[in-house]
Image (tube, rainbow, N blue to C red):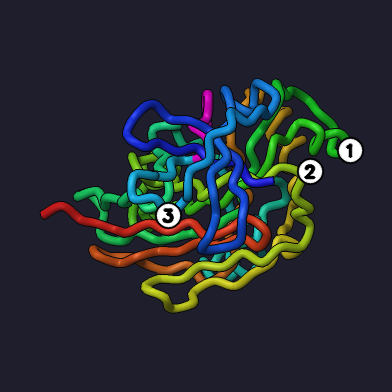
Amino acid sequence: MRIARFTIGSDPRFALVEGEPGSEELVVITGDPIYTPVQPTGERIPLDDDAVRLLAPVIPRSKVVGVGRNYADHAAEMGNELPTQPLLFLKPNTSVVGPDDPVVLPDWTEEVSYEAELAVVIGKVTKGVTPERALDHVFGFTVANDITARDIQRSDSQWTRAKGFDGSCPLGPWIVPGLDVDDLAVRSRVNGEPRQDGRTSQMVFDVAYLVSYVSEVFTLLPGDVILTGTPAGVGPVVDRDVVECEVEGIGTLRNPVLRRH
Protein backbone atom coordinates (compact mmCIF):
# COMPACT_ATOMS: atom_id res chain seq x y z
CA MET A 1 0.00 0.00 0.00
CA ARG A 2 1.17 3.52 -0.83
CA ILE A 3 -0.41 6.56 0.84
CA ALA A 4 -0.06 10.00 -0.73
CA ARG A 5 -1.06 13.48 0.37
CA PHE A 6 -2.14 15.73 -2.47
CA THR A 7 -4.07 18.76 -3.57
CA ILE A 8 -5.91 19.77 -6.73
CA GLY A 9 -6.05 23.38 -5.64
CA SER A 10 -8.16 22.94 -2.53
CA ASP A 11 -7.40 21.61 0.95
CA PRO A 12 -4.90 18.72 1.16
CA ARG A 13 -6.38 15.23 0.99
CA PHE A 14 -5.04 11.70 1.28
CA ALA A 15 -5.23 8.85 -1.21
CA LEU A 16 -4.03 5.35 -1.88
CA VAL A 17 -1.75 5.13 -4.91
CA GLU A 18 -2.66 2.25 -7.21
CA GLY A 19 -1.30 1.12 -10.55
CA GLU A 20 2.02 0.66 -12.28
CA PRO A 21 4.57 3.46 -12.82
CA GLY A 22 3.25 5.86 -15.43
CA SER A 23 -0.39 4.85 -14.97
CA GLU A 24 -0.98 5.38 -11.24
CA GLU A 25 -4.31 6.54 -9.86
CA LEU A 26 -5.10 8.29 -6.61
CA VAL A 27 -7.86 6.47 -4.75
CA VAL A 28 -9.11 9.23 -2.45
CA ILE A 29 -9.71 8.27 1.20
CA THR A 30 -11.43 10.01 4.09
CA GLY A 31 -9.49 11.76 6.84
CA ASP A 32 -5.86 11.32 7.82
CA PRO A 33 -4.82 7.63 7.74
CA ILE A 34 -2.43 8.07 10.69
CA TYR A 35 -5.48 8.74 12.88
CA THR A 36 -8.43 7.11 11.10
CA PRO A 37 -9.00 3.80 9.28
CA VAL A 38 -8.46 3.85 5.53
CA GLN A 39 -11.84 4.28 3.85
CA PRO A 40 -12.05 5.07 0.10
CA THR A 41 -14.55 7.73 -0.92
CA GLY A 42 -15.06 6.25 -4.39
CA GLU A 43 -13.27 9.13 -6.12
CA ARG A 44 -10.34 8.19 -8.36
CA ILE A 45 -7.97 10.72 -9.94
CA PRO A 46 -5.15 9.96 -12.41
CA LEU A 47 -1.82 10.84 -10.80
CA ASP A 48 -0.68 12.48 -14.04
CA ASP A 49 -3.67 14.85 -14.06
CA ASP A 50 -2.24 18.34 -14.55
CA ALA A 51 -4.25 19.60 -11.57
CA VAL A 52 -2.69 17.09 -9.14
CA ARG A 53 0.14 18.25 -6.93
CA LEU A 54 1.72 15.76 -4.57
CA LEU A 55 2.55 17.21 -1.16
CA ALA A 56 4.87 16.02 1.58
CA PRO A 57 3.07 12.85 2.71
CA VAL A 58 3.24 14.01 6.34
CA ILE A 59 3.85 17.28 8.14
CA PRO A 60 5.37 16.16 11.45
CA ARG A 61 3.17 17.06 14.37
CA SER A 62 6.13 18.19 16.45
CA LYS A 63 9.55 17.29 15.05
CA VAL A 64 11.90 15.59 12.63
CA VAL A 65 14.67 13.70 14.40
CA GLY A 66 17.83 13.21 12.35
CA VAL A 67 20.52 10.60 12.91
CA GLY A 68 24.05 11.53 11.91
CA ARG A 69 26.85 9.27 10.71
CA ASN A 70 24.75 6.10 10.68
CA TYR A 71 26.60 4.59 7.69
CA ALA A 72 30.28 3.75 8.17
CA ASP A 73 31.25 4.73 4.63
CA HIS A 74 29.64 8.16 4.99
CA ALA A 75 31.35 8.79 8.33
CA ALA A 76 34.66 7.84 6.70
CA GLU A 77 34.18 10.11 3.68
CA MET A 78 33.52 13.03 6.05
CA GLY A 79 36.62 12.22 8.10
CA ASN A 80 34.66 11.28 11.22
CA GLU A 81 34.80 8.38 13.65
CA LEU A 82 31.79 6.11 13.96
CA PRO A 83 29.55 7.11 16.87
CA THR A 84 29.22 4.64 19.72
CA GLN A 85 25.56 5.59 20.09
CA PRO A 86 23.16 7.32 17.68
CA LEU A 87 24.06 10.96 17.04
CA LEU A 88 20.77 12.89 17.13
CA PHE A 89 19.76 16.31 15.86
CA LEU A 90 16.44 18.06 15.24
CA LYS A 91 14.88 19.64 12.17
CA PRO A 92 11.74 21.75 12.66
CA ASN A 93 8.55 20.85 10.81
CA THR A 94 8.97 24.13 8.88
CA SER A 95 11.92 22.48 7.11
CA VAL A 96 9.58 19.99 5.38
CA VAL A 97 8.72 20.37 1.69
CA GLY A 98 7.22 17.88 -0.74
CA PRO A 99 7.94 16.27 -4.10
CA ASP A 100 8.98 18.73 -6.83
CA ASP A 101 9.01 21.62 -4.35
CA PRO A 102 12.12 23.76 -4.83
CA VAL A 103 14.92 23.67 -2.30
CA VAL A 104 15.86 27.33 -1.98
CA LEU A 105 19.49 27.80 -1.00
CA PRO A 106 19.93 30.36 1.80
CA ASP A 107 22.14 33.34 1.03
CA TRP A 108 24.28 32.66 4.13
CA THR A 109 25.70 29.36 2.88
CA GLU A 110 27.93 28.59 -0.10
CA GLU A 111 28.11 24.80 0.20
CA VAL A 112 24.86 22.83 0.38
CA SER A 113 24.76 19.03 0.11
CA TYR A 114 22.11 16.39 -0.60
CA GLU A 115 21.70 13.29 1.62
CA ALA A 116 19.30 10.53 0.50
CA GLU A 117 17.72 8.70 3.45
CA LEU A 118 15.05 6.26 4.53
CA ALA A 119 12.57 8.12 6.73
CA VAL A 120 10.41 6.54 9.45
CA VAL A 121 6.92 7.94 10.10
CA ILE A 122 5.68 7.34 13.65
CA GLY A 123 2.09 6.14 14.06
CA LYS A 124 1.53 6.11 17.84
CA VAL A 125 2.54 8.09 20.90
CA THR A 126 5.86 6.44 21.69
CA LYS A 127 7.96 6.72 24.83
CA GLY A 128 10.59 4.27 26.09
CA VAL A 129 9.66 1.51 23.66
CA THR A 130 11.97 -1.52 23.41
CA PRO A 131 13.64 -2.41 20.08
CA GLU A 132 11.52 -5.57 20.01
CA ARG A 133 8.30 -3.51 20.07
CA ALA A 134 9.54 -0.43 18.23
CA LEU A 135 8.24 -1.30 14.76
CA ASP A 136 4.72 -1.69 16.21
CA HIS A 137 4.80 2.10 16.70
CA VAL A 138 5.75 2.87 13.08
CA PHE A 139 3.06 3.95 10.63
CA GLY A 140 5.23 3.59 7.55
CA PHE A 141 8.25 4.73 5.60
CA THR A 142 9.05 7.40 3.05
CA VAL A 143 12.06 8.97 1.32
CA ALA A 144 13.92 11.98 2.70
CA ASN A 145 16.64 14.33 1.54
CA ASP A 146 18.50 15.70 4.56
CA ILE A 147 19.69 18.90 2.89
CA THR A 148 22.73 20.24 4.76
CA ALA A 149 24.63 23.54 4.67
CA ARG A 150 27.99 21.82 4.92
CA ASP A 151 30.07 24.96 5.48
CA ILE A 152 27.79 26.01 8.32
CA GLN A 153 27.88 22.51 9.78
CA ARG A 154 31.65 22.86 10.01
CA SER A 155 31.66 26.40 11.40
CA ASP A 156 28.87 26.09 14.01
CA SER A 157 29.28 24.11 17.20
CA GLN A 158 25.90 22.42 16.63
CA TRP A 159 23.83 21.58 13.55
CA THR A 160 20.58 23.53 13.95
CA ARG A 161 21.32 26.19 11.35
CA ALA A 162 23.04 23.78 8.94
CA LYS A 163 20.19 21.27 8.84
CA GLY A 164 17.08 23.09 10.03
CA PHE A 165 16.50 25.89 7.54
CA ASP A 166 13.28 26.17 5.53
CA GLY A 167 13.16 23.58 2.74
CA SER A 168 15.97 21.45 4.17
CA CYS A 169 13.80 18.35 4.59
CA PRO A 170 12.08 17.18 1.40
CA LEU A 171 9.85 14.16 2.07
CA GLY A 172 7.95 11.93 -0.34
CA PRO A 173 6.60 10.91 -2.73
CA TRP A 174 4.33 8.84 -0.44
CA ILE A 175 4.32 6.62 2.65
CA VAL A 176 4.56 2.83 2.45
CA PRO A 177 3.30 1.03 5.60
CA GLY A 178 4.47 -2.47 6.52
CA LEU A 179 7.66 -2.39 4.46
CA ASP A 180 10.58 -4.67 5.38
CA VAL A 181 13.41 -2.13 5.59
CA ASP A 182 16.26 -4.41 6.67
CA ASP A 183 18.02 -4.38 3.28
CA LEU A 184 16.78 -1.73 0.83
CA ALA A 185 18.78 0.25 -1.72
CA VAL A 186 19.21 3.96 -0.93
CA ARG A 187 20.31 6.00 -3.95
CA SER A 188 20.60 9.57 -5.17
CA ARG A 189 21.13 11.28 -8.50
CA VAL A 190 21.95 14.88 -9.39
CA ASN A 191 20.86 15.93 -12.88
CA GLY A 192 20.47 12.23 -13.69
CA GLU A 193 24.02 11.33 -12.64
CA PRO A 194 24.26 8.61 -9.94
CA ARG A 195 25.82 9.86 -6.71
CA GLN A 196 24.86 7.51 -3.85
CA ASP A 197 24.21 3.78 -3.86
CA GLY A 198 23.99 2.19 -0.42
CA ARG A 199 21.77 -0.27 1.44
CA THR A 200 19.91 0.00 4.71
CA SER A 201 21.65 -3.19 5.84
CA GLN A 202 24.80 -1.05 6.10
CA MET A 203 23.34 1.12 8.88
CA VAL A 204 25.34 1.19 12.09
CA PHE A 205 22.08 1.26 14.10
CA ASP A 206 19.01 -0.35 12.52
CA VAL A 207 15.52 1.15 12.37
CA ALA A 208 14.09 -0.69 15.39
CA TYR A 209 17.03 0.36 17.55
CA LEU A 210 16.78 3.96 16.37
CA VAL A 211 13.07 4.23 17.17
CA SER A 212 13.72 2.77 20.62
CA TYR A 213 16.71 5.01 21.29
CA VAL A 214 14.98 8.19 20.13
CA SER A 215 11.91 7.34 22.22
CA GLU A 216 14.08 7.29 25.34
CA VAL A 217 15.04 10.92 24.64
CA PHE A 218 11.83 12.38 23.20
CA THR A 219 8.19 11.40 23.34
CA LEU A 220 7.41 10.67 19.71
CA LEU A 221 3.99 11.75 18.47
CA PRO A 222 1.97 10.38 15.52
CA GLY A 223 3.36 11.93 12.36
CA ASP A 224 6.83 12.61 13.76
CA VAL A 225 9.63 11.55 11.43
CA ILE A 226 13.00 9.93 12.06
CA LEU A 227 15.71 10.26 9.39
CA THR A 228 17.95 7.20 9.52
CA GLY A 229 21.20 8.49 8.01
CA THR A 230 22.76 8.57 4.58
CA PRO A 231 25.26 6.36 2.73
CA ALA A 232 28.49 7.60 1.15
CA GLY A 233 28.51 9.77 -1.95
CA VAL A 234 27.15 13.05 -0.62
CA GLY A 235 28.15 16.21 -2.45
CA PRO A 236 27.19 19.77 -3.29
CA VAL A 237 24.19 21.06 -5.20
CA VAL A 238 23.94 24.43 -6.90
CA ASP A 239 21.32 26.63 -8.51
CA ARG A 240 19.24 24.80 -11.17
CA ASP A 241 20.35 21.30 -10.15
CA VAL A 242 17.69 18.59 -9.82
CA VAL A 243 18.16 16.06 -7.02
CA GLU A 244 16.48 12.66 -6.98
CA CYS A 245 16.53 10.48 -3.87
CA GLU A 246 15.27 6.91 -4.12
CA VAL A 247 14.59 4.14 -1.63
CA GLU A 248 13.84 0.69 -2.97
CA GLY A 249 10.24 -0.34 -2.39
CA ILE A 250 9.06 3.23 -1.88
CA GLY A 251 9.86 5.43 -4.86
CA THR A 252 11.74 8.51 -5.97
CA LEU A 253 11.68 11.97 -4.39
CA ARG A 254 12.59 14.72 -6.86
CA ASN A 255 13.38 18.35 -6.03
CA PRO A 256 14.86 21.23 -8.04
CA VAL A 257 17.41 23.50 -6.38
CA LEU A 258 17.15 27.28 -6.63
CA ARG A 259 19.16 30.23 -5.40
CA ARG A 260 17.42 33.58 -5.38
CA HIS A 261 19.57 36.34 -6.89
| Residue bounds of the magenta highlight | 57-63
Residue 42, how many percent across, how many down? 58, 32
* Left or right of residue 228, residue 193 in this image: left
Q: Disc 1 or 3, which lies upstream in sequence? A: 3
Question: Quarter-wise, where is residue 178 in the image?
Answer: top right
Q: Is residue 86 visible?
A: yes
Q: In the rendered structure, which amino acid carries the disc numbered 1?
A: Glu
Query: Disc 2 on helix, strand or loop?
Result: helix
Residue found at the far bottom of this picture: 193
Disc 3 designates what residue? 48
Residue at horizontal 73 percent and vertical 35 percent from the top: 138
Q: Which mark is residue 149?
A: none
Q: Distance between the Cα atoms at labels 1 and 2? A: 7 Å
Q: Is residue 217 left or right of residue 246?
A: right
Which quadrant: the C terminus?
Answer: bottom left
The verdict on residue 59 being magenta is yes
Q: CA distance from mark 2 to mark 3?
A: 35 Å
Q: The disc labelled 2 sits on which kind of residue?
A: Ala
CA neighbours of label 2 inside 10 A, class few (<14), some (14 to 19), many (20+): many
Give me the residue at 75% from left, 54% from top.
181
Magenta: main secondary structure: loop
Which mark is first along the chain, 2 or 1?
Answer: 1
Q: Residue furthest left?
A: 261
**Foreground pick, 29 / 146:** 29
Between 46 and 33, the one lying in front of the other is 46
Image spot of residue 187 (x, y percent)? 57, 68
Q: Which residue is mark 2?
A: 208
Name the residue that disc number 1 marks: 132
Tell me whether circle 1 and circle 2 mark residues in contact (CB < 8 Å): yes
Q: Would residue 249 be found to the left or right of residue 11 on screen? A: right
